[in-house]
Amino acid sequence: MGRPIVKTVLDTSVLIGGSLDRVDGDLAISAATIAELNFGVLVTDDPDVRAQRLTLLNGVQGRFRPTPMDEAVAFSYGVLAAATVRAGRQPRRRQFDLVIAATAHAHHARLATANYVDVSHLSTLITIIAGD
């Protein structure tokens, strides 16, 4: 019998950083990731950067069907945002990161991120895989 497949929600930082090949399991993304990637495409005035970001966005959309923000994710967001406040941090500064982490929390999945420091205070609530 093989190892069980573990679901892992990818933070946007993993997709941007190109460390996707270092994450195993059943991979998923949050709808918040698509929002962040779209924002990145639209906010830059540099056509070369826009083209790179659009290529990444298209590749992600072609590979993944985003997990939506539903009632379970909304509840988990509240739990994680409250934990963020208790840790002395500001949840509003990292709302998308918290929605992505909440997606992992709500679906009993791991969170893979290249920004471990930003979510390390949540490690008692979700399993976090630190990437590059």
Image (spheres, grey):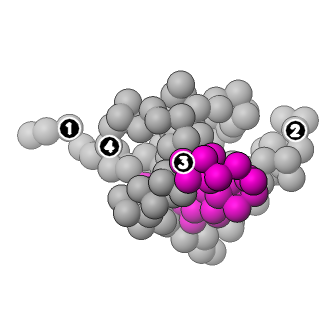
Q: In this view of the protein, can residue 96 be seen by the observer?
A: no
- Identified by mark 3, the residue type is Gln
The residues bearing labels 3 and 2 have C-alpha atoms spaced at a distance of 32 Å
Q: Measuring 46% from the left and 61% from the top, which residue is drawn there?
A: 58
**Numbered disc in front, either 1 or 2:** 2
The amino acid marked with disc number 4 is: Gly
Q: Quadrant of residue 31?
A: bottom right
Residue 110: image x %, image y %?
48, 43
Whether the magenta-drawn stretch holds residue 44 is answered as yes
Task: Judge whether 38 appears above or below 13 on screen.
Answer: below
34 displayed left or right of 107: right
**Residue range highlighted in magenta:** 28-52
> Which is in the foreground here, disc 3 or disc 1?
3
What residue sits right under mark 1 in the picture? 3
Residue 74 at least partly seen: yes
To which residue does mark 3 refer? Answer: 52
Residue 60: image location, x then y, percent? 44, 56
Q: Is residue 130 above or below residue 43?
A: above
Q: Secondary structure at mark 3?
A: helix
Residue tagged 2: 89
Please, what is the three-letter code of the amino acid marked with disc 2?
A: Arg
- Numbered circle sitting on residue 25: 4
- Give the spatial CA distance, label 1 vs label 2: 37 Å
Of labels 3 and 4, earlier in sequence is 4
- Say whether disc 3 or disc 1 marks the residue closer to the N-terminus: 1
Element at label 2: loop
